[in-house]
Image (tube, rainbow, N blue to C red):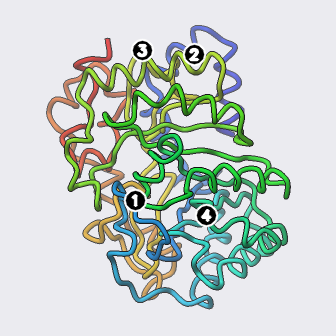
Amino acid sequence: MLSLINNLVEHVPFLKSYYLRNYSELRYNLFRANQLIPLIKFPRYVHFLITFDCNFGCKQCQVNANDREADLLTYEEITRVIREIRNAGVRHLIITGGEALVRDDVFDILRFAGDCGIPHITLATNGYLVERYRKELADVRIDRVVTSIDDVGEKNDAIRCKKGAFERSLKALEIFKEIGVPSREINTTVFPDNISSMKDLAKYVAASSATNWIMGTLIPMGRANTIQERYFTDEEFTRLFTLIKELRRTLPVELLSHTGYLKNYCEDITSEPFFCRAGIETCSINPDGNVLPCNIVNDDRFSQGNVREKSFQAIWKDGFKEIRNPQLPDDCNKCQFLAACRGGCWGYRVISERYCYMNFCT
């Protein structure tokens, strides 16, 4: 239904203008109306972290991989939850970590997700182990793969604290193409230290087996909280947005959707208008079973329940009340762009002062 609406307004100029000015409010109202007359299944997206373990040591890791202990959900518990997710009508399941491929039963988990009828399965991986597990990966259904590359060559390896990470990630994309994964995405975290490398990285992206490229900025969570000097100023954000606009002339690149409402930049650097899906269209499940509003804020203070104690459907139905009915700052309630923004990214709003870009998005 959402794709039909988007296609309709794209070809009717006066509808498109209204739609863009009120997009977030319209999407939110669709969710509220759907609670009364269910026409669309919610949530649409679930991120499932199956481990906190990782074979990398990325300095900007938002989940503190390798530095957290967890009473991991067993294979039996995970498959039960995946079945509940399927029954709830979830269309997109993202299997991630940590590094998902370090978990021994990851291929059994992926196979179960495909066999039980999840429509769209994504695997997020740093790519380092893909060549080793090529046969196992070819034997399961993966519709989309996401891997991270943050710079070129040894500079990327230094950021990700793993020698050979750059070459292995590019090789992984080749392998995923060869085994028939249709969507192959590169994610890049951009910060003041590496923004000058993005045009060089663009040459590698263009020559790679990636089908799309997503750029995002540092998320002030986990280990990233210790490197404040990597956060962008207003001027650096403007530089990034201008860079993406330029690169989009020749590459399928865009800004990560969680960044926020960017006014006139939205159509230039993103593929769809901004809408924060946290607790409305998406949620995230941690390796220990805690259910969080989204994959941006991996902090158990915001847990809405645990799948060991309640069903996924019950947590989705009974939780997320403060997120679905937020108390927005006064500046937001007075803003002329409230209907397009609705307070920006929930995650950034609760963990950072950076959630509004109106002072430089003219």
Hey, what amino acid is under mark 1?
A: Cys
* Of marks 3 and 4, the one in the foreground: 4
Residue type, label 3: Asn
Which amino acid type is shown beneath numbered disc 4? Tyr
The picture places residue 317, in percent across and down from the top left corner, at: 46, 67
Q: Secondary structure at mark 2?
A: helix
- In the rendered image, which residue does mark 3 sit on? 264
Viewer-proximal residue among 5 and 214: 214
Quick one: quadrant of the C terminus? top left
Query: What is the C-alpha distance between the residues marked 4 and 1?
Result: 13 Å
**Which dot marks residue 24?**
none
Secondary structure under the numbered disc 3 in the rendered image: helix
Q: Of the residues shown, which amino acid type is indicated by label 2?
A: Lys
Point out the tag, 3 or 4, that comes first from the N-terminus: 4
Q: Where is 139 relative to 144, above or below?
A: below
Numbered label attached to residue 58: 1
Q: Earlier in the sequence, mark 3 or mark 2?
A: 2
Asked which quadrant contains residue 44, the reply is bottom right
Looking at the image, tell me whether mark 4 or mark 1 is earlier in sequence order.
1
Horizontally, residue 36 falls left or right of residue 326, namely right
Question: Residue at label 2?
Answer: 16
Label 2 crowd bin: few (<14), some (14–19), many (20+), radius 10 Å: some
Quarter holding the N terminus is top right
Mark 4 or mark 2: name the one nearer the start of the chain: 2
Question: Looking at the image, is mark 4 or mark 2 nearer the viewer?
Answer: 4
Q: Which residue is mark 4?
A: 128
Nearest the viewer among 313 and 174 is 174
Query: In the figure, 260 relative to 138: above or below?
Result: above
User: First in sequence: mark 2 or mark 1?
Assistant: 2
Figure quadrant of residue 229: top left
